[in-house]
Amino acid sequence: MKFFLVRHAEFQSTARGYEEYEANAKAPLSSYGLIEASVLAKKLQRLGIDKIFYSPFQRTRQTAEIVHRQTGIPSVCMDELREHKIVSPEKTRAAWRKLRQAMEQDHALTAPDSESFNQAGQRLQEVISRLEGSLLNKVCLITHERLIQAWLSLIYPVKPLTRIDTASITLIELTQHGPILRSLNDRPLSFSLFCTRLKRRIYQSCRQKISVIK
């Protein structure tokens, strides 16, 4: 069985660090994020995904909706795929950042109203274990960077944590010998490719305007 762990497309973040969890839960995709989600949809369709499960946050829901609309792949919201919760007792950006960095170093560390990286990783592991018993062959989980990082750190305890880009795909295959990492942070649309396509569109548009003037 194959699991495609996907981080949501780029979103419009307006919250300060210590307000990130609650405020950003409702943040929509950015203009670039809409393009990322559209390109991601084409990639997932080629991969032959059977079903999509996504986090209830707005950015993951919107990413999943775009994929479903373009591909018809069935999609279901799953609360267990929500973002890894980090809440600093001291309501300052510096305190929130310090807590996050400490948690990234000590994966067992937690705080009031927060969960450790180990707890977040175990939450995703429980989702994978539950779906492993289904008749599905290729499953896509659209979730968040820290949740993917937390699960990977349980399987491959490497520090520092691997960066997971927006709209990227990490492929895990479950075998009789355990999970095997087939690909990591595969981006269907890189920023350089986006710029190249944008330049091409601008160039074509200018040529059309010049042709009309002539």
Image (cartoon, helix red, strand yellow):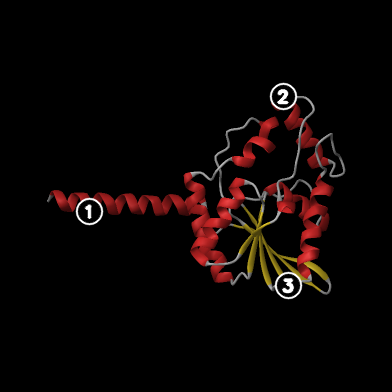
Give me the disc on residue 208. 1
Q: Secondary structure at mark 3?
A: loop
Question: Which residue position is annotated with label 3?
Answer: 1
Report, in whole angstroms, how far the alpha carbon at label 1 lies from the one at label 3. Answer: 49 Å
Task: Give percent across and percent down for residue 42.
Answer: 51, 64
- Asked whether, in this view, residue 213 is left or right of residue 58, the answer is left
Instruction: Decide: few, some or many residues near mark 2? Use Cα within 10 Å; few <14, some 14-19, many ≥20.
Output: some
Would you call the spot at circle 3 few (<14 residues within 10 Å), some (14-19), or many (20 or more)?
some
Location of the N terminus by quadrant is bottom right
Amino acid type, mark 2: Thr
Figure disc tally = 3
Q: Which mark is residue 141?
A: none
Give coordinates of residue 153: x percent, y percent: 80, 52
Q: Going from the N terminus, do you reach mark 1 or mark 3 first?
A: 3
Real-space CA distance between mark 2 and mark 3, rounded to the nearest whole angstrom: 43 Å
Which of these two is toward me, 153 or 71? 71
Residue occupying image coordinates x 59% and y 72%: 48
Q: Amino acid at mark 1?
A: Gln
User: Residue 173, percent across and down?
Assistant: 73, 69
**Callout 1: few (<14), some (14-19), or many (20+) C-alpha neighbours within 10 Å?**
few
Residue 110 visible, this angle: yes
